[in-house]
Amino acid sequence: MDALIDSRPGPTRKATPTMPQESPLAMPVQSLSRFDKTQRRRWLLAASAKKPWVSRIAAFGGALALTAYGGYEMYKVVDVGGVTMLKWALLFLFLANFSWIALAFTSGVVGFFWSLFHRGQPQAPQTLSARTAVVMPIYNEAPSRVFGSLQAIWEDVEATGLGAHFDWFFLSDTTDPDIWIAEERALTALRDRLGPDCRVYYRHRQKNTSRKAGNIADFVMRWGGGYPHMVVLDADSLMTGRAIVTLAARIEADPDAGIIQTLPLIINRNTLFARVQQFAARIYGPVIAAGLSAWMARDGNYWGHNAIIRTAAFAGHCGLPDLRGKPPFGGHILSHDFVEAALIRRAGYSVYMLPTLKGSYEESPPSLIDVSARDRRWCQGNLQHIRLLPTKGLHWASRQHFLTGIFGYLASPLWMMQLVLGILIVLQATYIRPEYFTSEFTLFPAWPRFDAERSLALFALTMGILLAPKFLGLILALTEGETRRGAGGFFRLIVSALLEIVMSALLAPIMMLVQTGHVTHILFGFDTGWNPQRRDDGSIPFKAIVRKHRSHMALGIVSLIAGFLISPSLVAWMSPTIAGLVFAIPISWASGQLGIGLALRKVGLLQTPEEATQPPIAQRANALARQLAAEHDDHIDCIRFIHADPEFRAAHEAFLPDYKRRAKGDITPERALAEAKLNDAETIDDAIAWLKPKERMVALHDRALIDMIARLPQTEADLPKGEEKAA
């Protein structure tokens, strides 16, 4: 058996340039307030102009009909004894929330029937004609994992025989100097393993302007002219060679395609929370994705990764402006992918998904708290889209995508308001003396009450609509032999689905409060920031869990006591919500536990086919990550490493761009401090102890300061005579 990592001597590190020769591509900033429709390109293929009217009528018409029926039933529920202002407010909130789940239901039904007739995946190509860039933006990630993943993808593409059509790029926005130097070391080692013709490149930005969107834009503007297409990955992405070459072939054959999106499945997850997400994405995700694909057709959306993009179209029409004002609603656009899809569709290019294409994977956060941290950033990005809804020239489907993202977060505070109003109305009916006879003449008194029987029927309808997409996905999974066997068989698959439903029901009220908090903070003007995502399966410290959820648990206990004081039936009605909040701390703790997730895996619950038989590319990537982590520490001290290894120091300087000569007087505080500290340092240990992270970043970007680091003695004994450190 071949060694995991080829240990044969590699080429010299100067054999491959750090980046290919630049091929600039203009990327003008797009106007959101002006658009000339006469400039929109026309379809070149007749098939591009076809609209999926049947799917759209079924999805949106069905959702409208269901919402109208649900609204009528809710009106009859609150109409008993007259409709007060509180009841009108409750009816409005119910309609807002019900319409949301009604559309998800009808879209799932469309996806179910679409999936019955579209089970085969696209044909793999034999040839390609153009060159494609595969870009992986990275930001403070563990180098062993991301470099191991990209090597596994590279090898799989090479195995298709079409590897000559792809160039590979790490686009680093890393701000941790230790990780940055570890990335460069991992890149040089990767090139040595793959050989001089691997065409794997690396670029690091000193300032991560506009974050990921700016990272991709920088690549497009400097090198995009050399590549008709680019496959965009995330740091946790994996794609098989078959999937990547199929995307390339599809966009070559479709001149109208601007973005082609895949459906990434979640893999490699082991904690309870992550395995619940992994199972749900695998069993229910295909039905939901098929429904979206069916009614969106060529007016689709982009999720920012595991997709192929027509580079010139992206450059010409997806330059994002900064929004006026300060964050959270101003500044650069956070959820850039939705906006890029909308702008490229506005220009006359199609955006669509290949939901049956296999071999596209990603990972997910390991715990509820990790999801909450990521969700806050997503919440700000989606609420920012409120300002983008009036953008001129957008297709109606693009605006609908914006609304979907916006309401995905507004739904939580609206749900919370609906619960509060329901409690207030019950409280009013229980403790406030009713006005039996109003100023208007009536034969009967006005009693503040509900139609209990109709209310129960409406609750059952709502639950059925909410859960139906899950059951449709389960039915499809049960009818697919490979999926059913991979999920542990008929019985285990059903038990797993029930377990997922219970876990989701318990987690839902916690996420309701978490997202309500996010929305509130953002509406009050607090910026989210951008912290790197935790990728490992380690658990959160219990004290942090208590701090995060103690208010949620307290609210649950108060709701339970108040419910019993008001009406025991109210407690029964709110029992799923109250249970999730009362047990928020143990639920959150359990969600991040590796042992619980692995125990369920051992008995075959929450199992996915990709977990039962791990995809070869995932096996390879995981094995590479483990070996690279063992051979090359991801947490090196950058200053000591640069000082100790002259060969690597020369390679590092070769990675640095040729900056223009610094103008006299143009000195940043970080550079001034770094230079002063290096001047005072008498040994490398002094420099390591004194230089702060920002000063290290500046120093390692400056060849003059790197030279000062290199000249520092290792110890005091190495100092020239007469220069020993003073006592």
Image: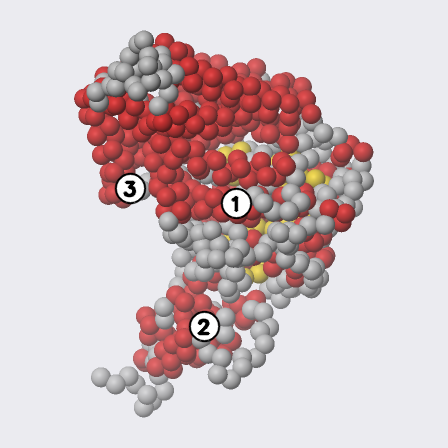
Q: Mark 3 falls on what kind of element?
A: helix
Amino acid type at image mark 2? Ala
Residue 263 left/right relative to 605: right
Is disc 3 surrounded by few (<14), some (14 to 19) or many (20+) residues within 10 Å?
Answer: some
Tell me where residue 266 appears, x and y as whole percent.
50, 34
Residue 228 left/right relative to 414: right
Q: Nearer the viewer, residue 137 or 517?
A: 517
On residue 626, which mark appears?
A: none
Q: Is residue 324 above or below residue 726?
A: above
Amino acid type at image mark 3? Lys
**Can you say which quadrant of the picture contains the C terminus?**
bottom left
Decide if residue 713 is in sight here.
Answer: no
Q: How is the image coloured?
A: secondary structure
Residue 627 left/right relative to 256: left
Residue at point 41%, 73% (across, down): 670
> Which residue is disc 3 drawn over?
548
> Which residue is disc 1 drawn over?
385
On residue 699, which mark appears?
A: 2
Tell me where residue 286 appears, x and y as whole percent.
56, 27
Q: Nearer the viewer, residue 508 or 251?
A: 508
Q: Nearer the viewer, mark 1 or mark 2?
A: 1
